[in-house]
Image (spheres, helix red, strand yellow):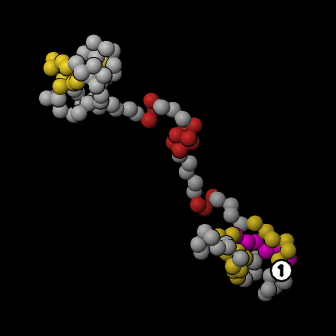
């Protein structure tokens, strides 16, 4: 039996021997020619890797941490087609939020400068 790294080969026929059985007492037996070698018991091989050993674009995208401060996020827009129900102002600020299930429409929350607020479920 000849070992190259974690692979063990039969010295009689060159066949790759089966993977470890996990016990020191297991004697490797070649499935091809039947040769045995009690001096070369099977070994349990443990491999450890780090994420940096296998770089990928997906892993790089996931590792980029982005911090967003809620008060700095601009989520309001102006709807020029909607008038305020209270004061009649043309162009009312609105935000779109998902308050219900993902398979249902979003909720539009309108905010006028006069203080009037209302919402519409789409």
Q: Secondary structure at mark 1?
A: strand
**Percent position of residue 51, x then y:** 44, 35
**Percent position of residue 101, x then y:** 58, 72
> Which residue occupies 22% across, 24% down?
28
Residue 91 belongs to magenta span = yes
> Which residue occupies 28% across, 25% down?
31
Left or right, 5 with reference to 110? left
Left or right, 11 with reference to 56? left
Q: Residue furthest top?
A: 12
The quadrant the C terminus occupies is bottom right
**Percent position of residue 19, x then y:** 29, 30
- The answer to which quarter of the image holds residue 99 is bottom right
> Which residue occupies 33% across, 21% down?
16
In-front residue for pair 27/102:
27
In-front residue for pair 60/48:
48
Up the image or down, 63 lies above or below 73; here it is above
Up the image or down, 17 lies above or below 56; here it is above
> Which residue occupies 58% across, 60% down?
70
In-front residue for pair 102/19:
19
**Percent position of residue 65, x then y:** 53, 46
The quadrant the N terminus occupies is top left
Up the image or down, 33 lies above or below 82; here it is above
Callout 1 environment at 10 Å: few (<14), some (14 to 19), or many (20+)? some
For label 1, the residue is: 83
Please state the extent of the stretch shown in magenta in the rendering.
90-95
Q: Residue furthest bottom?
A: 86
Count of labels shown?
1
Principal SS element in the magenta part?
strand
Up the image or down, 26 lies above or below 5; here it is below
Can residue 61 be seen?
yes
């Amino acid at each position: 039996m000849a070992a190259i790294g974690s692979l063990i080969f039969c010295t009689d026929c060159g066949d790759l021997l089966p993977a470890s059985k996990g016990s020191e007492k297991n004697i490797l037996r070649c499935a091809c020619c039947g040769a045995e070698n009690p001096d070369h018991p099977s070994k349990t091989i443990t491999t450890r890797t780090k994420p940096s050993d296998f770089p990928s674009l997906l892993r790089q995208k996931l590792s980029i941490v982005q911090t967003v401060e809620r008060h700095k996020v601009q989520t309001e827009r102006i709807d020029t087609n909607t008038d305020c129900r209270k004061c009649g102002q043309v162009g009312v600020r609105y935000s779109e939020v998902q308050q219900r299930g993902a398979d249902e429409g979003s909720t539009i929350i309108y905010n006028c400068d006069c203080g009037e607020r209302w919402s519409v479920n789409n």
